[in-house]
Image (cartoon, grey):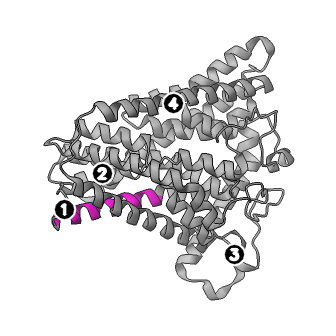
Amino acid sequence: MILISSLLSFWQKPFFSNFGAIVTFAILGTFIASVVTGVLVYIGGLMYLMYRLPFVECLMFGALISATDPVTVLSIFQELGTDMNLYALVFGESVLNDAMAISLYRTMSLVRSNDPSGQNFFMVIVRFLETFVGSMSAGVGVGFTSALLFKYAGLDIDNLQNLECCLFVLFPYFSYMLAEGLGLSGIVSILFTGIVMKHYTYSNLSGNSQRFVSGFFNLISSLAETFIFIYMGFDIAMEKHSWSHLGFILFSILFIAVARAANVFSCAYLVNLVRPAHRQIPLKHQKALCYSGLRGAMAFALALQSVHDLQEGHGQIIFTATTAIVVLTVLLIGGSTGTMLEALQVVGDGHDARLGGEVFEGSNGYVPTACDEDGTSGSRLRMKLREFHKTAASFSELDRNYLTPFFTSQNGDDDDEEDDPMPSSRGGGFHGRY
């Protein structure tokens, strides 16, 4: 519910105009953070700096602790009026990051349970792709099916609006149950269903249904979020913890900070290789991204699962460390975010609707600038990344010219409405936390 509500209520254009960077941070960045954390925890155990865990279990810990949940940071971002591109990057990473972390954790768990001595690297990659790509495909397929249904079924008449709203609410659950039934990840599936339904299905609803489902998901997500934090509070107080390994907690915090920096700065470097000069992610935004990586409910839930997955008390140690990290990051990072944003001078520009200066033609294609013709920076890596960027721009054109007309009842003449940085009343938008 929280995922669907966030996707429905977020401003569409800042999210999709930064989608390439979001995917880079959420998928590649999460993988980097997971591996760096796992390797550092394993090395720390070998050097007797902390409790020693087997290598696969270290990777499991790295995967679960890489799930970020910047709820507090995002609310402060919105209150202080930060740049929309920075807000979109933090929001988008937190949404896709959970799916990646869950897939990595499940992959490592399967590797451990099937062959405790370890498997070759190729089989690990195959298992991960099987989980992530399969779940993504199931979610996208359900999303496109819902778009076609709402386009051609004629449910947008007065006496069928209740049925229209009910079906819209049930499709994400169908995606979740389908993925779980196939042995895939339901959360990854429901995430991509939400993205597709926001982009295509939502516009096929009648105006009243749009307003209803937006308000409904907002209400349910608020209730679910409140329940999650109440549950976390009870669980922290009532679960058995293992506080005898404080070194594991302290060094884990240090290693997580190093992994977060490796994640953000390496991915930002790759993104900036592709983008023209006026669309580069500035250093102050990279620092804000690095600082906003607090841990929350998803890391806590996976750590609680590790208590049942890992024997010999290892799961208990991971759960205790994760609990301490969640509490410390929420209190310290959440409490100092306002001061950090002011120090980095990224507040007060939240209403800049230029989307980082990105230029669009009628086809929504990327317009190269003079910076793209710079031959002095044309290394092989940069050229390959630029070719990939052109492919992404071509996909945007494909979406506008073919996919949107096919899956929606619109004809693509809503540019003025899309350029509005705030949701319109027709879109059922509401100004919640997201």
Q: Which residues are magenta?
A: 28-46
Estimate how packed mark 4 is, as few (under 14), some (14 to 19) or many (20 or more) residues with alpha carbons within 10 Å. Answer: few
**Amino acid type, residue under disc 1 in the picture:** Gly
User: Disc 3 to disc 4, how far (Cα)?
Assistant: 42 Å
**Amino acid type, residue under disc 3 in the picture:** Ala
**Of pointers 2 and 3, the one earlier in the residue sequence:** 2
Furthest-top residue in view?
159
Indicate the quadrant where residue 296 lies. top left
Estimate how packed mark 3 is, as few (under 14), some (14 to 19) or many (20 or more) residues with alpha carbons within 10 Å. Answer: some
**Of pointers 1 and 3, the one earlier in the residue sequence:** 1
- Does 21 sit left or right of 108 as displayed? right
Residue positioned 47% across, 40% down in the render: 188
**Of pointers 4 and 2, the one earlier in the residue sequence:** 2
* Percent position of residue 317, x then y: 22, 46
User: Disc 2 to disc 3, how far (Cα)?
Assistant: 38 Å
SS at mark 1? helix
Q: Quadrant of the N terminus?
A: top right
From the image, state whether disc 3 or disc 4 is nearer to you: 4
Can you identify the residue that label 4 sits on? 226
Can you identify the residue that label 1 sits on? 45
Residue 39 among those drawn in magenta: yes
Magenta stretch, main secondary structure class = helix
Can you identify the residue that label 3 sits on? 277
Tag 2 and tag 3, C-beta contact below 8 Å: no
Residue positioned 59% across, 77% down in the render: 383
For residue 296, say whether it is visible.
yes
From the image, state whether disc 4 or disc 1 is nearer to you: 4
